[in-house]
Amino acid sequence: MKGSSFRTEISIVPGKPITLQDRILTTGSCFAQQFGDWLLGNKFNVLSNPFGTTYNPISIHENLIDSLTNKLTETLFVESDNIWKHYNYHSHWCASEKQSLIDSIHEQQGIVKENIKNSSVIIMTYGTAWVYNHLAENTRVSNCHKSPAKLFEKLLLTVDEITDSFKALYEKLHQINPDIRILLTVSPVRHTKDTLTLNSVSKATLRVACHTIINRFRQVDYFPSYEIMMDDLRDYRFYDRDMIHPTAEAFDYISQKFSDHYFPAGVTSFIEKWKILKQALHHKPYQPHSSQHQLFLKELLIKLKAISEVSVDEEVKLVQSQIVNNV
């Protein structure tokens, strides 16, 4: 059909700009980690997923609230094989001694609190509305840490529960930083362990919750990562071999949409310039002391020193350390 388009590209109205000077925190699912790392790679000032992968909204919200209040629920510590963990935190938060784990989490909470005080934007990625309720404590947890299933009950969060939990976080955030913005997104990663049918129920719940939140609270926006993957790309060539996670190409496409949506022209031009410089920095020469490579390094150093948008002190030191003065 002449003039027809064989795709349904998502139309996104440009949002309030995000600049290289903004401080950003990302938190939530593995997609939040990927997104945070992408921003870091482009020289943004980012604290990327400080508590590790967290899938459900309640736990995402409560991890941030606990950071602001220095709270750590004593009854949710668990010990197995001489390793201590906490049901509200990812398994990489572990230690052979309980006090060591307490100290590590409190230290990270302090980092998060200080970051929030000075942040411009929090990017929150919800992964699933399915959550495990710890029966003895009657509380939702982030991670079961392979504890016996009989200790938990699997529940589907309601839109009201998610919205009420967000309200508690929103009020705490704006007490400490009234100007902070929140960007919500739903992870495009499918949770097949819930079955595809119940994954759809979960994602629909998250999406309605996000819609409710952005219409109820100011300075909250929604970025359609999920819709871009489902309704624009919607092709198995954009899924990894597990048929669950987006490929690198899919993520590049989604991040480009984010860039188009939030980054002013000066930022996008810097990203393009930095992309070329990053490739040069990662170049592995066969003969590092050759005159040709030494000339390459000296020219790269001049280009790095010309960067004014962000600090590149580490990159400058790296290149300088590779230059042989007598070549």
Image (spheres, rainbow, N blue to C red):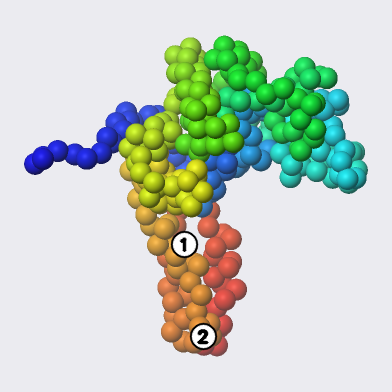
Q: Position of residue 141 (x, y in %)?
A: 72, 27
- Residue placed most toward the observer, 241 or 115: 241
List x then y, in percent, for residue 85. 81, 38
The residue sitting at 87% across, 41% down in the picture is: 80
Q: Secondary structure at mark 2?
A: loop
On the image, numbered disc 1 is attached to which residue?
278
From this viewpoint, which residue is outermost toward the left? 2
Question: Residue under circle 2?
Answer: 287
Q: CA distance from mark 1 to mark 2?
A: 20 Å
Q: Is residue 271 above or below residue 145?
A: below
Image quarter where the N terminus lies is top left
Where is residue 236? Give x, y as percent. 39, 46
Asked whether 54 or 147 is in front, the reply is 147
Q: What amino acid does circle 1 point to?
A: Lys
Q: Position of residue 94 (x, y in %)?
A: 80, 43
Residue 72 in the figure: left or right of residue 266: right
Label of residue 261 in the image? none
Q: Residue, x 83% and y 19% (percent of image)?
A: 136
Is residue 149 or residue 252 the one in the foreground? 149
For residue 135, side relative to residue 40 (left or right): right
Mark 2 residue type: Gln
Q: Is residue 14 above or below residue 133?
A: below
Quarter of the rendering containing residue 231: top left
Where disc 1 sits, the SS reads: helix
Q: Earlier in the sequence, mark 1 or mark 2?
A: 1
Residue 205 seen by the camera: yes
Q: Residue at x 60, y 73 (%)?
A: 321
> Could you say which is closer to the camera, residue 4 or residue 104?
4
- The local crowd at label 2, few if under 14, some if 14 to 19, many if 20 or more residues have their Cα within 10 Å, is few
